[in-house]
Image (tube, helix red, strand yellow):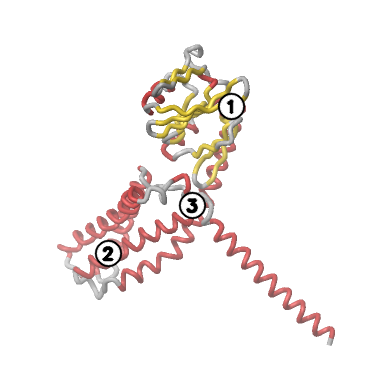
């Protein structure tokens, strides 16, 4: 009897370990979608993705001619296929540019992750699927029914999209971590950058406010419309001044000093203050020396970091 209990106990333990292993794999898979992800919204890369998807739709329909397209008269077929490509392109543009413009906070690239990318990809897929099914049904192509067939096509894209995002996150994460390591290695050998005229004082004049600094005394400037925050070193540590000043004046003042580089729309950073660069699937983050601040490098300005 005890022998039988031991066997049953071993089997139960084995089954439990299998379920725990499966649960761990599922959690690891789901956690991938919580990690930072590379955004292509509102960018040239997004435009290229849109063109690629449109061309892909046209090529697939042209080569395989599914859904009864093969039965269409040759005189009409090419125009229908071109319109299908245009529908795919327009759907992509809406998702890559219109939605991000309307819902800017949701599409903020600095807080973009796999979950948001999946939502965007599913939106692209359902818009293209419904758009194509509506157009082909209106042309009486085959036995296509709108919206049923469009929803069926969309359903078939869900698993490939999930797997694609999972794989791409892994690839981008590895890529930017490797690049960040190389950049950190280069930073160790980087000499201090000075202005052509290091004695030329930085002067920021606002509304009844004025701040004068030696160039390498300034760590970074955070520019927000007509207000800018300046973080700088003084004999007692780190200080901050907030000045009401036009952003163009700040940028013009800093443009004469080579150590100040733009890494996002509102950050001008003294490259001598870079402590460490880290990478993720989203891109690069910069840790600033002596300041509890992480600068998330925008995709638009990542080349500025890679050229240092």
Q: Judging from the image, what secondary structure is the residue with disc 1 in?
A: strand
Q: Quadrant of residue 67?
A: bottom left
Task: Kindly tell me whether residue 274 is visible in this rendering.
Answer: yes
Residue linked to disc 3: 113
Residue linked to disc 1: 238
| Mark with earlier residue (1, 2) | 2
Image position of 169 with respect to 153: above or below = above
Residue 132 is marked as 2
Disc 1 to disc 2: CB gap under 8 Å: no
Q: Position of residue 33 (x, y in %)?
A: 51, 56
Mark 1–mark 2 distance (CA, rounded to whole Å) = 59 Å
Task: Identify the residue shown where x is 84% and y is 84%.
Answer: 2
| Mark with earlier residue (2, 3) | 3
Q: Is residue 185 left or right of residue 42?
A: right
Disc 2 to disc 3: CB gap under 8 Å: no
Image position of 187 with respect to 83: above or below = above
- Nearer the observer, disc 2 or disc 3? 3
Task: Identify the residue shown where x is 72% and y is 77%.
Answer: 12
Q: Residues within 10 Å of mark 3 (few under 14, many from 20)?
A: many
Q: Judging from the image, what secondary structure is the residue with disc 2 in?
A: helix
Task: Identify the residue shown where x is 53% and y is 55%.
Answer: 34
Task: Work out whether residue 85 or residue 126 is closer to the camera in this orientation and state it.
Answer: 126
- Nearer the observer, disc 1 or disc 2? 1
- Nearer the observer, disc 1 or disc 3? 1
The residue at the far front in this view is 208
């Amino acid at each position: 009897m005890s022998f039988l209990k031991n066997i049953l106990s071993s089997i139960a333990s084995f089954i439990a370990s299998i379920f725990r292993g499966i649960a761990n794999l599922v959690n690891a898979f789901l956690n991938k979608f919580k990690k930072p992800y590379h955004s292509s919204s509102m960018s040239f890369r997004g435009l290229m993705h849109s063109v690629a998807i449109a061309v892909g739709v046209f090529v697939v329909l042209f080569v395989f001619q599914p859904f009864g397209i093969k039965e269409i008269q040759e005189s009409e077929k090419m125009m229908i296929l071109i319109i299908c490509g245009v529908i795919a392109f327009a759907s992509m543009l809406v998702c890559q540019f219109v939605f991000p413009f309307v819902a800017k906070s949701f599409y903020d690239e600095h807080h973009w992750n796999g979950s948001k990318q999946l939502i965007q990809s599913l939106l692209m897929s359902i818009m293209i699927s419904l758009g194509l099914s509506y157009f082909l049904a209106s042309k009486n192509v085959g036995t296509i029914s709108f919206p049923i067939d469009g929803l069926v096509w969309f359903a078939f894209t869900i698993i490939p999209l999930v797997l694609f995002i999972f794989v791409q996150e892994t690839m981008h994460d590895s890529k930017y971590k490797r690049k960040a390591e190389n950049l950190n290695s280069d930073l160790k050998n980087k000499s201090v950058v000075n202005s052509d005229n290091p004695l030329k004082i930085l002067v920021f004049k606002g509304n009844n406010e004025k701040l004068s600094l030696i160039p390498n005394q300034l760590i970074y400037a955070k520019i927000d419309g007509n207000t800018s925050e300046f973080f700088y070193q003084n004999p007692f540590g780190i200080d901050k001044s907030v000045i009401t000043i036009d952003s163009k004046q700040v940028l013009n003042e800093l443009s004469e000093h080579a150590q100040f580089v733009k890494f996002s729309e509102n950050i001008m950073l003294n490259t001598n203050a870079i402590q460490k660069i880290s990478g993720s699937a989203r891109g690069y983050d910069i840790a600033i020396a002596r300041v509890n601040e992480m600068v998330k490098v925008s995709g638009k300005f990542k080349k500025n970091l890679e050229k240092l």
